[in-house]
Image: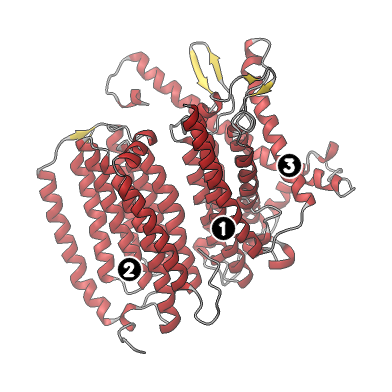
Amino acid sequence: MLHLILFLVFGAVCVAGAVNLLAQRHPINGALSLVAVMGSLAVEYLLLGAEFVAAVQVIVYAGAIMVLFVFVIMLLNAGVEERTKGSRVALLFGVPGMLLGSVLIGWVLLGHGAETVPVGALPGAPKVIAWLLFHDFLLPFEVTSILVLIAIMGAVVLASHPDTEQGKKES
Amino acid sequence: MPALLRNTLFRNQALNITAFIIVSVIKTVLSLFVLLTAVAYTVWLERKVVGHMQNRWGPTRVGPFGLLQPLADGVKFLFKEDLTPPHVYKPLYIAAPMIAVVFALTSIAVVPFGNWIKIGTLHIPLQITDVNIGLLIILGVTSLGVYGVALAGWSSNSKYSLLGGLRASAQMISYEISLGLSLVGVLMLAGSLSLRDIVDAQRGVFWGFIPRWNIFYGGQFIAFFIYLMSAYAETNRIPFDLPEAETELVAGYHTEYSAMKFAMFFMAEYANMITVAAVASLLFLGGWHGPVFGPPILRALLPVFWFVLRIFGFLFVYIWVRGTLPRFRYDQLMAFGWKFLLPLAIANLLITALVVAIRS
Amino acid sequence: MVPISYYLILSGILFACGVTGFLIKRNIISIFMSIELMLNGVNLSFVAFAAQWHALSGQVFVFFVMVVAAAEAAVGLAIIISVYRTRETLNVDQVDLLKL
């Protein structure tokens, strides 16, 4: 019972944040509602027993990636969005189309998977995940570390000032 | 907690749940009250200690030894005119100090203050909640605290605030990495992320009288040094306080704030200091272990006293450094964090991992 | 007890919102944030299935998704910064010429 209540409350926060991201015209408001979505998603992960994934979601996603977004919005001084003809057309066709699509998917899903999962069904303890990460998934782990290195170099080169030699000091 | 989710309705089960809720609420209110009072008196401590280092008295007039000075400051902040400049982005201007304070006060939820208190048949751990991933929660809340600073700097719509906010948030996220990495050595020694387990692993003495703290027995003195430096940078204190230096940036990200909102940023900074001191005491300095004697009530409260003593020592070193060192320039600061502390933290991690692997 | 299909419906709603945002927004940064929303929806799906089939590889894969999202966010935002420097606008409708 409490599980259902918690799921519904934080699911409502997720959906409200996602809809707010669509409705807001200033990107900074969108970024902050996305942070709220990520926070409530972390709680949903906790309800599914994935405690380590929830902590990493808060530390990495909400605490680092979204801070990067907020930095760029602050640096570029992104203003309020303008309404053009193209955006009105997209609104007219896009929103009903996606609503229709999601209602269809929801209807199909409700018909099928009715297995219930109790709270914390799967022990997502850091020890177990670390074992998997460093034994079964060692190759993807090493490859993603090289990917991150390439991304760092790429970001520094792309964002560096074209006139001077030195790049910017922000992340 | 699993008891709460089973749908059985036995009478003593309901009483158990009610007792649990009441005790948790009391613990939360007490911890918040103690933390806020500690924040106020840390300000007093700083003014006294820095004053004595500069060969002058600190506050002496309001109450004996100036002990009622924080009260007078609080009243002053409440009565000051709360000015909202016209060109700010109002929603975020008002929300930013609230975000800073909320995340600064949240970390106290997983910090254990001592062992157990026994009331009748009820065993109450001196911690609001003991989660398996307590340390990660503190790191996560520290990462989220950057938003308060960044949004304050941007929403104030002024060049000093924007620059100060950008500098402060870039500094905070750079030093979060070495902060986290310096703690991984301790985690490898303790084998758990729960703060209570980490403290329990530092029980006892070796060689007769030296306590088994992680800084001595665990060999984590380099990690302690890295943690100390990263903590100074995280909380924007001297020698890393360029983002709020008066001679450089007027007041950095809180230039345009007045009265209660400024007081909230102030409180958030000192609450962060206390949280960082508490984590250092738990992880490196042995938590609440110390000589315990006497009747049961004393046995339950003495560990809290030793813990508070360690936090006080750490805060004293904080204030001592503030009174002594000049501040880094911004590029020196960033170079120190990325090019010195980060490789040193990784090296410490490697050596600790080698030692743990060889020992087991 | 919450059926797994509820989690999947929530994940589907988040993904649909992400796609809608991608289609209707005109600011580059908002489009990029809708992509992050889609990735989050997919992460929830992974964790839900990991809980259903008792396979921890679902949670491990969430890590890889997060790492890739971080790398993509860094490079994407750097590209946005350099596009802004040359075109002086963040509106996708106005970035429609290969050569200025």
Q: Is residue B72 visible?
A: no
Q: Position of residue B296 (x, y in %)?
A: 62, 11
Viewed as shown, does residue B160 lie left or right of A10?
Answer: right
Q: Residue at x 29, y 50 (%)?
A: C43
Asked if the residue under mark 1 is in contact with the one under mark 3, i.e. CB atoms within 8 Å, the reply is: no
Q: Disc 2 versus disc 1: distance between alpha carbons?
A: 25 Å
Q: Which residue is mark 2?
A: C31
Q: Disc 3 versus disc 2: distance between alpha carbons?
A: 47 Å
Label 3 element class: helix
Q: Is residue A45 visible?
A: yes
Q: Position of residue C33 (x, y in %)?
A: 35, 63
Seen from this angle, which residue lies furthest front? B358
Q: Please, which colouring scheme is shown?
A: secondary structure
Label 1 element class: helix
Viewed as shown, does residue B249 lie left or right of B116?
Answer: right
Q: Residue at x 24, y 57 (%)?
A: C15
Label 2 element class: helix
Whether B235 is drawn above or below B290: the answer is below
Name the chain under label 3: B
Viewed as shown, does residue C48 lie left or right of B39?
Answer: left
Q: Residue at x 39, y 73 (%)?
A: C79
Circle nearer the N terminus (3, 1): 1
The image quadrant of residue B250 is: bottom right
Three-letter code for the amino acid on which mark 2 is drawn: Ile
Q: Residues within 10 Å of mark 3 (few under 14, many from 20)?
A: few
Three-letter code for the amino acid on which mark 3 is drawn: Val
Three-letter code for the amino acid on which mark 1 is drawn: Val
Whether C30 is drawn above or below C8: the answer is below
Name the chain under label 2: C
Q: Residue at x 77, y 45 (%)?
A: B320
Q: Which residue is mark 3?
A: B317
Q: Which residue is mark 1?
A: B149
